[in-house]
Image (cartoon, rainbow, N blue to C red):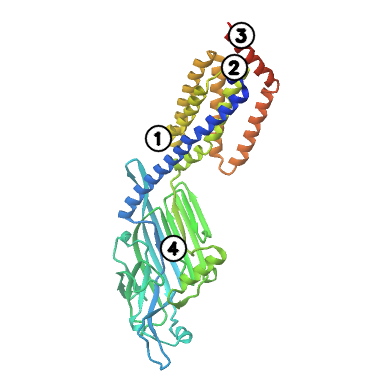
Amino acid sequence: MLSNVNTWARTSITLKLIIIGILILVLLIPTNMIQDMIREREYTRDSAIQEVASKWGLDQTVGMPVITIPYYTLNAKNQPENIKHYAHILPEDVRIKTKLVPDKKKRGMYEIVLYNTQITIEGSFKSEIENLKKEINAEFHPEQAYIELGISDLKGVKDIVSFVINDTAAYEFNPGVPSSDIYNSGMSCPVDLTTQDDFNFACAVNLNGSSSLYFLPYGKKTVVELNTNWTNPSYQGAFLPDTSNTNGSGSYAKWKILQLNRNYPQYGFNNFIKQSEQSAAMTNGQKDSSFGVKLILPVDQYQKTNRTAKYSIMFILLTIISFFFIEIINKKRVHPIQYLLIGFGIVLFYVLLLSISEHLNFDAAYWISCAGIVTMISMYTQSIFKQLKITGLIAIILTTLYIFFYSLLQLQDFSLLMGSIGLFIILGVTMYLTRNIEWYKETEERQTVAASTKSE
């Protein structure tokens, strides 16, 4: 009885398939560990970028000049209360021109994109004090007004910034803003508006930053023109440019945004912009109205390696199934340990790809890793089957699979379609090649051979 059980265990195809399924599940453990490793290396890269950027200048968001006027609400006796509030007036036509000059820096083996940009801001203000007084019973103090300019990371400011009114009066900005109603970070300068009605203004900012540059469309009409010699821009935010052009020498983009494209008016009290944007986010999901450009690196090896690793279970499954059918057709048994070693060889491909791609470009790393794994598994196959024909067949199957999955990586928009068609073809070929196999007969023959071997 025990000998019959041993014979069945050694020859049963069903049991072999169950064991193979368990081995594939076991191989999911190192596969998930590799994906964790990819995320860890990506986090290390991001930490290095953040460390360098924090000393140079982080992602920058530039706001428009805004007039801030202190006021005190009046009580029933028409007397001012002690709590100071702020009213804010946004500019009319705003014209911004910026020349963004990127620079790649190295931190260890990681590449970091920094930039310097020269920003000129011109526009005009319309006096809205009388309109403010009509909306609220308060005592306004235009003689204590401020001009606020939003800069998300003041560390990146490289020169003194002046605010010029009507080409004559110049005010020097100081760090900080009197209130956080409009900007959480920025600079401001006091200006007496008792003698100013409508006026034109101009200012220039020399700014360092990293990765991205955004603007806030606080003008009644905001026009932004951006020039850069970076050839891989990604325009992001609430608005896409009306005009954009990218060629081998750089990129140009132009935005024109109207007051009607926003969810807040030209003047208001306290944090009226943030309240309006929060209300808009609840209705249409748009968190804010910022827009700009992100300087992306043309190759992100971690993103591509992570995408490659997502196909790992499919690759392991197809490779092990190929060995299983070769085993059935050639009546040469392959031990579960040998299946496990082949599976670990496939998993090792992703470790090689991750480590090599940190020093070479992704394509070179992919094919170097592919050549190494195909050679190793082919030599191991030769040691198992002792037939050059089978060894060559395995090498062709593995190479075809690596070419197929590499093609999926290149076809981002059609990867699902091509993957579905590829799997359809693979399944069809497998069915065709195994159409004449009599599985029960194969089991009986194996049991007979095993019994005769044991009797001898």
Looking at the image, can residue 402 be seen? no
Residue assigned mark 3: 452
Residue contact at pointers 3 and 4, CB within 8 angstroms:
no
Q: First in sequence, mark 1 or 4: give its number.
A: 4
Residue 260 placement, left or right of 169 = right
Residue type indicated by callout 1: Ser
**Alpha-carbon span between mark 3 and mark 2:** 11 Å
Q: Callout 2: helix, strand or loop?
A: helix
Q: Is the C-beta separation of discs 3 and 2 under 8 Å?
A: no
Q: Which mark is residue 355?
A: 1
Circle 4: is it few (<14), some (14-19), or many (20+) Cα within 10 Å?
A: many
Q: Between 5 and 33, which is closer to the camera in this rendering?
A: 5
Mark 4 lies on a secondary structure that is strand
As drawn, 141 above or below 397: below
Instruction: Name which residue type carries label 2.
Output: Thr
Q: Position of residue 347 (x, y in %)?
A: 47, 31
> Whole-Å distance between the Cαs marked 1 and 3?
51 Å
User: Which is in the foreground here, disc 2 or disc 4?
Assistant: 2
